[in-house]
Image: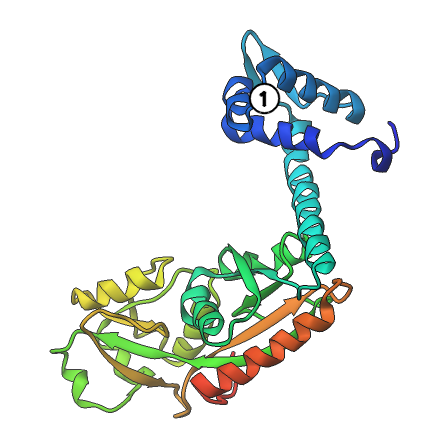
Amino acid sequence: MQNMHDSMDLKLLGGFLAVVDHGSITAAAEHIRLSQPALSRQVGELERRLEIRLFDRAHTSLRLTSAGRQFIPLARDLVARAESLHRTARRIALGESPQFRIACPSATVRGVVAPFVAGTGAPIFDTKLDIADRVYAHVLNREVDFAINTMPPPVGLRSELVGSAPLWAYFAPDHPLGDQDHLTVEDLVHDPLIVLASGTGLRQVIDDALWPVRNRVTIAAEPVSSDLAIAMAASGRGICLDLLPTSFRLTRRPLLGADGARITMPLYAAWQPEHFASKEIAQLTSTLTEWMAEHHGPQPARH
């Protein structure tokens, strides 16, 4: 095989990914505004340089080979890094500060990232959304600059605990528990509960909080979306445990653990220590920590 540093052409990778994404040479060529024969030659040239067959060609259809399927994430990573390098180089040339793409759960965007950007002008230009237990993979694969997540980061990443957000119990306005100024986990044993699905950081916090009453609670639903979970509570289907603000007509009360302490969810920032803008990410993380303390208070993290 030729030296890949010398022989790889990003146009060839882009053409390959276009065929993968659009399902055929014809559709891909139309999307990227290239002739079908030219795109076919690009795919063939990439296979020649890699010395592997990426597609099985039967009649007029293309099917990915096993090697082709394995090559997809590598190609996407190379193209994403090249695009990031190009953006960064242009900003450096113009004397601009770095702009960052982050990975985080969707609820974290709504509850933290979007309000943080709106309130501070933080240099975050895009997000990669995933459930909490897959968020750090995007940092490790260098698909994003850093992550904001509700689960502890793996060893090897530079990270900071930037704050914690309080957990609330949401229920219909006419519920008898509305007379109380707060709820404990003991108050939850008489009603069906609506909690987020496994794999989310919030679910981990909820499971830990409910451990003392685990044999006496009933889980009625486990949606992936916080918005849907809260909407289900608004429809009277149970008590939702979550932390997002909502526009639904609901009653919410602070939730206390078996020890009487307020239950909160930790929030972490994590990034590659060798990232070219590691210093700037650390400064941005400090700003986020201050913002979290101002908006949610300096609650201690609970696991």
Viewed as shown, does residue 33 lie left or right of 230? right
User: Which quadrant of the view contains residue 247?
Assistant: bottom left
Say which residue appears at 28% left-offset and 89% top-offset: 182
Residue 90 x, y percent position in the rendering: 69, 53
For this orientation, the residue located farthest to the front is 94
Residue for badge 1 = 34
User: Residue lying farthest left?
Assistant: 174
- Residue 264 position within the rendered picture, expressed as x and y whole percent measured from the top left: 44, 81
Please state, as top left, top right, bottom left or bottom right, where the N terminus lies in the image. Answer: top right
Tag 1: Cα neighbours inside 10 Å, few (<14), some, or many (≥20)? some
Amino acid at pointer 1: Leu
Q: Quadrant of residue 236?
A: bottom left
Q: Is residue 138 left or right of residue 250?
A: right
Viewer-nearest residue: 24 or 287: 287
Image location of residue 296, percent across then percent down:
44, 84
Q: Is residue 302 visible?
A: no
Position of 170 compared to 265: left or right? left
- Identify the colour scheme used: rainbow
Q: Nearer the viewer, residue 190 or 1?
A: 1
Residue 67 lies, with reference to residue 233, above or below; the image says above
Answer yes or no: is residue 65 visible.
yes
Return the residue nearer the eye: 16 or 150.
16
Task: Give the x, y percent position of residue 50.
Answer: 78, 27
In the rendered view, does 219 fall on the left or right side of 96?
left
Residue located at (47% from left, 87% from top): 294
Q: How many marks?
A: 1
Q: Quadrant of residue 134?
A: bottom right
In terms of secondary structure, where does tag 1 sit?
loop
The residue drawn where x is 60% and y is 32% is 17
Q: Give the residue drawn at x 55%, y 28%.
A: 32
